[in-house]
Amino acid sequence: MSQPLPASPGTASHEHVVGMGTVLDHVRTPREVLRPHIVEFRNVTKTYNVGKAEEFTAIRDVNFVVEDIADKGEFICVLGPSGCGKSTILRLIAGLEPQYPATGGDVLVLGKPVIGSGSDRGMVFQDYTSFDHRTVLENVTFGLECLHMPRKQRDELGREWIQKMGLNVENDAQKYPHELSGGMRQRVAIARTLALKPRIILMDEPFGALDPLTRLNMQDLLVKLWKEVQATVFFITHSIEEAVFLGDRVYLMSNSPGTITEELKIEPANRPAHEMQRQPEFLEAVYYIRDKITKLESNP
Amino acid sequence: MNSTFLNRLSHNWLTLRKPVSRLQAIGLGVACVLVCLAGWWFLTRGAYESRIVGPLTLPSPAETFGKFPELWNDFALTRNVLVTLRRVSIGFALALIVGVPIGVTAGCFPRVHAFLSPLIMLGRNVPLAAVLPLMIFIFGAGEKNKVMFIFVASVAFVISDAARAIMDVSARYIDTAYTLGASRWQTITKVLVPLAAPTIFSACRQMFGLAFGYIMLAESIKIADDVGGLGYQIQIFQRRGFREHIYLIILVIPMVALVIDQVLAWVQRQLFPHVYGGDGVLRSLVRVTLIPWENMKSRAFYRTPTSLPSVATAEGPK
């Protein structure tokens, strides 16, 4: 802790630039944000087994605000050591038990407290969650089917999304998930979420199980599609490169109990992943974050 | 030299878990049957007095199979097989109709499961031979008694297997369904039940085999005259001392069970192509029959949401 690092929270310092990122001197508060808030956390705490011997606080006093940028949305990446409560934050936004409801504080989406889950907050998981009994097309149209959209209409939309995800409509639409590779399964999972046009897309390490090359391809695809769907994305990852490449903002979290310690603003991705991830400015930002996380992990 | 030969033989023939070709598998099965028949013949060859195993214990193969026409014609084998099958099928179908919905409900809602668990415990552990006399008091000695016996014998197992199958579906599928906007009911009908269905089906397929065994017990209690069925027949033959017929029926039962099991296996493959491969004829059939129902719901409930742009505008840049 002796090494003086600028921009650690609490100390009076100013914004500074690291490569293609800008480290804010503190995590923004609602007062500093002019546009409406799409997601806001106010002193959110989640404790499990309250009052029992195995009481455990996953996150404590998490505060942050994400503004609703019209027709675009922001891409927020959340980074931090393992077990720091990244998934807890995502699942609180999604309204999924047992993380939801929070033990204390307010989770607000568009100014209203989150009550349960809904298709306005789509989620993509790391584990393959394709419905094994449904074909690719039936998987992609699942949410539309739940809305009772007529079959013809939803199949048409589904085929369109299958194509956008880089899958072959003719060959793949009638396949079952077990016939697909990991990358293809995640494409189906993403298509299934995007087809519902959610305002917020929550992604919990969606590319964590993919091989490096597939991962880069998926990153490029995601950037392209995200520009089209105009949603706010929360993206959890262990890969700092992935976070800096995809993110407009990066939240850094500290360990047990988890809280957000730092916010970085990142220049948007404007070229393919494999190209951009070699730029010195890109690497500078990555190294800065890596040092921070290493420090957080060794010094909880 | 000799040991290397044995070594090679053992490596080629007994490689750990090496798959066998279909032809070889059938050949080996036939070989087993032939070995058993040969053993049977050897033990019962020659004149009555000089046999290793006496004719009162085990008749020879020729004597046994010689009685087949009599069993087929005079004792109406097919009719009795069908009578027995009908009883098992009706009783088991009742157990499915009652047990699967209860089991699914219990699997979905742990409170329901906790409430039902004493009954499931009782049903699974009750000594069936002891229940049978009670069943006669309640349902009489006729058909109803036998059908209800199969029902009572299997319904608790159906419930607990269905509940277990639902509980074993990973929670991440529920999370996924919820974040895609599915209601609780839709999550049950579109996700939990279809994902658990292959497990439930194969558990029931095994249980049907057991139920086929229970029916022999119910049929061997003779109160009314000629109730028919294989169990009843065995009872008659035992009283008259027709050993050959009993052995024949014991050989017939597994064959009938095998045929039924193969039929169920086919149904299973066609219903769940995502588990067993194949073209899923029955699955397609089920889906096609549901289309009118689905269309009706679409007409009743679907409102074009404002947040979902039509296909044409989804592409265009703002």
Image (cartoon, grey):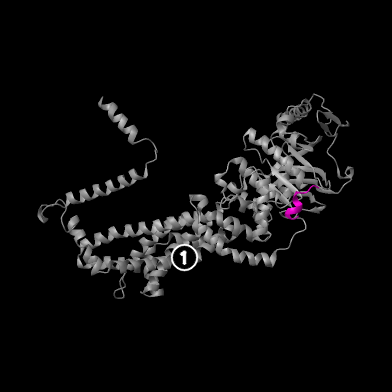
Q: Secondary structure at mark 1?
A: helix
Which amino acid, by three-letter code, is at mark 1?
Ala
**Quarter of the figure that contains the N terminus of chain A:** top right
Q: Chain of mark 1?
A: B
Camera-nearest residue between B241 and A215: A215
What residue appears at the point 69 percent right and 55 percent down from the top-left corner? B181
Q: Position of residue B48 (x, y in %)?
A: 11, 56
Which stretch did the figure color magenta? B309-317
Instruction: Identify whether A179 is placed above or below A287.
Output: below
Q: Residues within 10 Å of mark 1 (few under 14, many from 20)?
A: many
The residue at which mark 1 appears reads as B95
Q: Position of residue A148 (x, y in %)?
A: 67, 61
Q: Position of residue A214 (x, y in %)?
A: 64, 36
Instruction: Identify whether B208 is placed above or below A277.
Output: below
Camera-nearest residue between B232 and A131: A131
Q: Is residue B184 left or right of residue A132?
A: right
Q: Position of residue A243 (x, y in %)?
A: 73, 35
| Residue B122 seen | no
**Quarter of the figure that contains the C terminus of chain A:** top right
Instruction: Identify whether B155 is placed above or below A219.
Output: below
What residue appears at the point 37 percent right and 35 percent down from the top-left corner? B15
Camera-nearest residue between B161 and A242: A242
Does the magenta run of residues contain A227?
no
